[in-house]
Each structure stands twice: as C-alpha cells, then as structure tokens.
Image: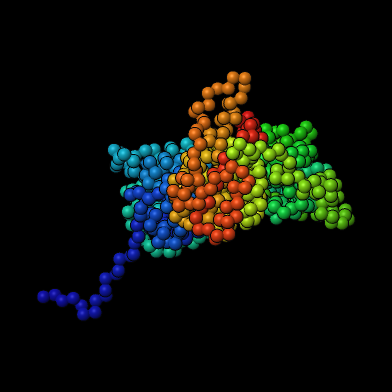
C-alpha cells in the first residue's frame, strides 16, 4: 500500500475572491467617491450594501429622481464624485430627469445601474439603458466581465472626476456575481486629478493685452470658475475689473468691494447698468449665454468679449467672441496676473491694485456697489395685503432672520428670482442652482444633497408650491435624516410661470389647467413630521426665530401665500429663450 510522505507540503490555499459587485464598490471607495443616494431593489441590493460595507455613506431616497438630484447637489457642493444606485429598467427611468440635470451641468456623478442581461430579454425590466443614458446626454460605461470589472470602474470614475461628466455605469445582473481576486482591489492605487491646464503663452499674452487696454473691464465667472475665486480676485484687482458671476457661481466673490453679484436675469438695475457699461467682458468657465447676458443685451456695441474655458467646443458657442482661451480658469488667471505685474515692473509703475486703469475700480463705484448692487437694497413697492405677502418682503425678512452660514438651494419656477437675488450666501459652496434642464420638482432633492455636502451650514430651500408638491416624497427623507431644513414655499396656488406667460392680453385664456385651489402645505408638512407654518404677512414669520432658537432637528416648512407681482422680472428673460 502506498503511503503519503510524512512531511508533504500543504495544498496551496485558494486565493480570496469577492463578487464583481463588491469589487466595484471597493474600487469606488478606494478612489475617493463620496456619498451614495438611491432606492434599493433586487438588482442593486448587493452593490449598495457593498458600498456601505466599504465605508461609502448611503442615503435611501423615496424616489430615484430624488436620489439622482441629491447626488448631483452633493457633488456640486462637496467637490467629490457623487454616486446613485438604481434598480434595472424602471429604477433608471425614474432617475432620468435628475441624471439629465446633472449631465447638462457637467456634474461628476456616477449612476450605478443594474442591467437586465441579454439572456433575460423577456424580463419586465429589460430596456435599452445605454440609449436612455445617451438621450439625457450622460456618458455610458459598462462593467463587462470579472476580468475587466476594476478597470471598467476606474475608467468610469476618472471620466466623471477628471472630465466633469455624469456617467451611467451599467452593471449586468449576470456579471455582478462573478468572482474577482480580492488582491486586485487591494493593489489599486488611487491617482490624483490631473494638473489644471494652463493656457498657452500666446493666448495668455493676448488676454493680457486686452485687459491692459481696457478701461472698464468686467470678469464674469461661471461653473468653471468655481474654486478659482482667489486667482480671479487677484486678476480683477490688478486689471481694474469689476467682478460678477453667473447664477451657478453665486457667492464666489462674496465680500469683495467690487462684486456685482449675479449677471443676467437676476441682476439688480445697478449691476445690469455697470455690466452694460463695460468695454471688455471676460468669461471664466462661463458660457456667456442668454441667461447670463440677457440675450446679449448686457453686451453693448463696441464691447470686446473674451472667454476662458477647459472645453474648446464651449468657446464662442453661445455668441461671437474676440478671443477664446483654452485653459483652466485659476491657472489662466494667475498667468495673466503675472504678465500684468511684469509689464508694470518693466515700466516702473508702482503696484496700485489696478487703479492705473481708472474706469471701474473707482471709489464712486465702490460706494454705489455697496449701496445698490443687491436687489434687497433696491426699493420696491410692497404688494402685501388681502392675506398675501409680497415675495420680495418675505425674502428680505428671511435674509435677516436666517444665519449667515447657510446653503441655499433653488427649485425652478416663477418664484426663483426671489431666493436667488435676496438670500445672501457666504461663498460659491453656499448656493446650489440646478436649472440646466429647467425642471421643477428637483428642489427637495437638491436641498438634501447640498445639506449633506455642507453639514456645518443651515440648509435653505426656495421652491414654489408646484415644485414642492411634485417632489414632496423627499420631505420624509429630510425628516428621517433629522435635517434642520428651511423650506420657503412661495405659494401662488398655480404653475405661476405659465399663468404669467399665457395669462395676459385683451382676452385672457382659460387658466384652469395651471391654477389650483389653495393647498394647506403647512398641514401636509406637519403630517410628514416637519414643523409647518402659514405666512400671509411679515408678522407671521415670528415663529421662524423661535424655531431657529430651538436647536431644531426636523425641517421647517414656510407656506407663504404670496401676492402676484404680475410676472417676476426675470420671467420675460426665461420665456424669450423658449
């Protein structure tokens, strides 16, 4: 009889393996993905739990549309890649509007979408998921197999982070359970974002020459200028320029003596006057589109226009320009500032903060800007009465009551100019404006995602009654998260934009399709577990101070019955683009 050797070597242990779903989750965690939002079903149950086990925070939304919008707002306000987890088929279609908003806004978000396989074409959940993603302008990636799972995930993450794209990463059901050696994830090395692209020397010199020759320059920063505030302030001081932002970058220049605020439909009369008086407008990461330039009316005859952007296709896409500069906003601003200073040194000029250009950085303009660059400092008639409050007075008083450390989120609708123009914010991470798709109903999701990105600030939502009721399921999410979220509902019992757009003329049309009986939104809010108050005049806002002093752990919903302004001042701008 044969015998085994007394000292035979033990059999090699099988390598530790994990599922593809676990590998994807662990890879995203290792790469630095931020918060995940979603609605869990059978197809995304494992990936969601794997993310949680890997240390990625997860918030369960009440609707996939809310989850996608939360991830969009989180990514904008945190600077990290946001994640969305959805079921195959209907879970993805429910999220489509939120995905479209993020994609159009170039927000770094990854949608982890379970996907019915080719073998299950008869499945109720089977659909063309890549086609849907492309239809709302998102990038499409897929985890193809166990062998490529980590590389596929890394590619999707870098596309989202480095190219500022929204990516739908499809996870086929028959691939999710395949096994991957755990050591492959452990060996993964996270890479930093690429170094910001500095514009070429010729382009930097050309922009320097334009600024040096200008007498009344204005720098307008957009989404691509967020995070470049310090460099742009230095360039403005050196070149004698005034500063402004598009709506999405609101707050970027907060505290600067020459900050005009928002350029475009939300501009105060003084801001519009000073921008219109510029002889040079330079957009940094700003499309200079119809919203920001009032369909070109803020650019007067003889004004030169330059544009700095990382995306070559964006240069001159919205309007003719005199100079297009391909480069990162901060890096380009720093290079131009250095050239301007070198010119001064060569000519023996003393540093004077840009005063050598006279023009716009004058003491007279500084005083005017301090006094009247904001709508809240611009006198308007008080329309309150008859049980309704003027939305401008409502917004002015709340701006005084609410703490300065706030993060304001804006839904879409006729009301939206009031919180945007009247509620001050501390910086560009204090204002979340999700309007690229122009969908109402995204407000609550936006406010929740923004609140989780900036937990040290009081979250504030400005919304209309139509949008608030459309997305109201997420009020339960805010209550469950114990968020002290202030929801200002500008309640006109209508889809106000349509009322004002179509309701004029000698023979007003039937508005029954867009006007509704008054809804007791405060009572509905109390049913969700929030505090609800009804406001018909300034005196009714007293409970807001009491709520703020109570160390609140649940939302406050302000059901403000607003007086009609005959159509918000910015509304004509909005509909002119339709």
Q: In the picture, residue 406 is in which quadrant?
A: bottom right
Q: Which residue is nearer to you in this view: 544 or 238?
A: 544
Q: In the picture, residue 283 is in which quadrant?
A: top right
Answer whether residue 380 is visible to the viewer in this image.
yes
Which quadrant of the figure contains the C terminus? top right
Looking at this rendering, what residue extends furthest in the bottom direction?
A: 6
Q: Position of residue 304 (x, y in %)?
A: 76, 37
Which quadrant of the figure contains the N terminus? bottom left
Q: Position of residue 211 (x, y in %)?
A: 78, 45
Q: Which residue is drawn at the image coordinates 35% and 54% (left, top)?
A: 46
Q: On the picture, is 182 further left or further right than 325? A: left
Q: In the picture, residue 457 is in which quadrant?
A: bottom right
Q: Which residue is nearer to you in this view: 180 or 508?
A: 508
Q: How is the image coloured?
A: rainbow
Q: On the picture, is 114 further left or further right than 32? A: left
Looking at this rendering, what residue extends furthest in the left direction?
A: 1
Q: Which residue is drawn at the image coordinates 70% and 52% (left, top)?
A: 254
Answer whether residue 209 is visible to the viewer in this image.
no
Q: Which residue is nearer to you in this view: 386 or 512?
A: 386
Q: Which residue is drawn at the image coordinates 59% and 47% (left, top)?
A: 540
Q: Position of residue 339 (x, y in %)?
A: 78, 52
Q: Position of residue 294 (x, y in %)?
A: 68, 35
Looking at this rendering, what residue extends furthest in the top direction?
A: 507
Q: Which residue is drawn at the image coordinates 34% and 43% (left, top)?
A: 116
Q: How many marks?
A: 0
Q: On the picture, is 445 further left or further right than 16? A: right
């Amino acid at each position: 009889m044969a015998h085994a050797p007394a000292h035979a070597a033990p059999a090699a242990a099988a390598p530790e393996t994990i599922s593809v779903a676990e590998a994807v989750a662990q890879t995203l965690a290792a790469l630095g993905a931020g918060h995940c939002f979603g609605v869990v079903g059978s197809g995304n149950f494992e990936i969601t739990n794997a993310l949680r086990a890997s240390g990625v925070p997860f918030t369960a939304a009440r609707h996939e549309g809310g989850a996608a919008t939360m991830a969009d707002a989180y990514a904008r306000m945190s600077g990290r890649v946001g994640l969305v987890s959805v079921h195959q088929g209907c879970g993805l279609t429910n999220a489509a509007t939120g995905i479209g908003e993020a994609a159009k806004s170039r927000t770094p978000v990854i949608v982890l979408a379970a996907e019915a396989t080719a073998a299950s074409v008869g499945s109720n959940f089977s659909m063309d998921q890549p086609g849907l993603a492309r239809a709302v302008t998102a990038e499409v990636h897929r985890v193809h197999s166990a062998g490529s799972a980590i590389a596929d995930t890394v590619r999707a993450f870098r596309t989202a982070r480095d190219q500022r794209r929204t990516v739908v990463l499809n996870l086929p059901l028959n691939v999710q359970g395949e096994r991957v050696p755990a050591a492959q994830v452990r060996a993964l090395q996270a890479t930093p974002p690429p170094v910001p692209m500095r514009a070429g020397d010729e382009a930097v010199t050309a922009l320097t020459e334009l600024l040096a020759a200008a007498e009344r320059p204005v720098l307008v920063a957009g989404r691509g200028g967020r995070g470049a505030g310090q460099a742009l302030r230095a360039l403005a001081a050196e070149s004698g320029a005034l500063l402004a932002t598009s709506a999405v970058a609101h707050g970027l220049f907060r505290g600067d003596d020459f900050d005009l605020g928002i350029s475009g439909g939300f501009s105060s009369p003084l801001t519009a006057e000073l921008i219109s008086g510029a002889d040079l407008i330079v957009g940094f990461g700003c499309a200079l589109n119809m919203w920001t330039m009032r369909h070109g009316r803020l650019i007067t005859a003889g004004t030169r226009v330059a544009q700095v952007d990382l995306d070559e296709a964006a240069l001159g896409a919205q309007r003719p320009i005199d100079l297009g500069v391909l480069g990162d906003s901060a890096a380009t601003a720093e290079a131009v500032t250095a050239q301007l200073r070198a010119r001064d040194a060569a000519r023996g000029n003393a540093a004077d903060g840009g005063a050598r250009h006279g023009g716009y950085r004058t003491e007279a303009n500084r005083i005017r800007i301090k006094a009247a660059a904001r709508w809240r400092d611009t006198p308007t008639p008080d329309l309150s009465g008859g049980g309704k409050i003027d939305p401008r007075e409502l917004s002015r008083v709340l701006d005084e009551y609410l703490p300065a450390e706030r993060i304001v989120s804006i839904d879409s609708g006729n009301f939206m100019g009031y919180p945007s123009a009247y509620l001050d914010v501390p910086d560009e991470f204090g204002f979340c404006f999700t309007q690229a798709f122009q969908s109402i109903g995204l407000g609550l999701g936006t406010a929740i995602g923004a609140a989780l990105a900036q937990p040290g600030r009081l979250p504030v939502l400005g919304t209309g009654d139509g949008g608030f009721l459309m997305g109201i399921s997420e009020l339960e999410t805010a209550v469950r998260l114990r968020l002290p979220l202030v929801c200002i509902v500008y309640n006109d019992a209508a889809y106000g934009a349509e009322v004002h757009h179509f309701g004029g003329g000698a023979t007003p049309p039937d508005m029954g399709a867009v006007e509704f009986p008054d809804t007791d939104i405060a009572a509905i809010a109390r049913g969700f577990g929030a505090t609800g108050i009804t406001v018909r005049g300034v005196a009714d806002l007293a409970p807001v101070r009491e709520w703020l002093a109570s160390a609140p752990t649940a939302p406050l919903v302000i059901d403000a019955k607003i007086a009609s302004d005959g159509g918000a001042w910015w509304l004509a701008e909005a509909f002119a683009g339709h």
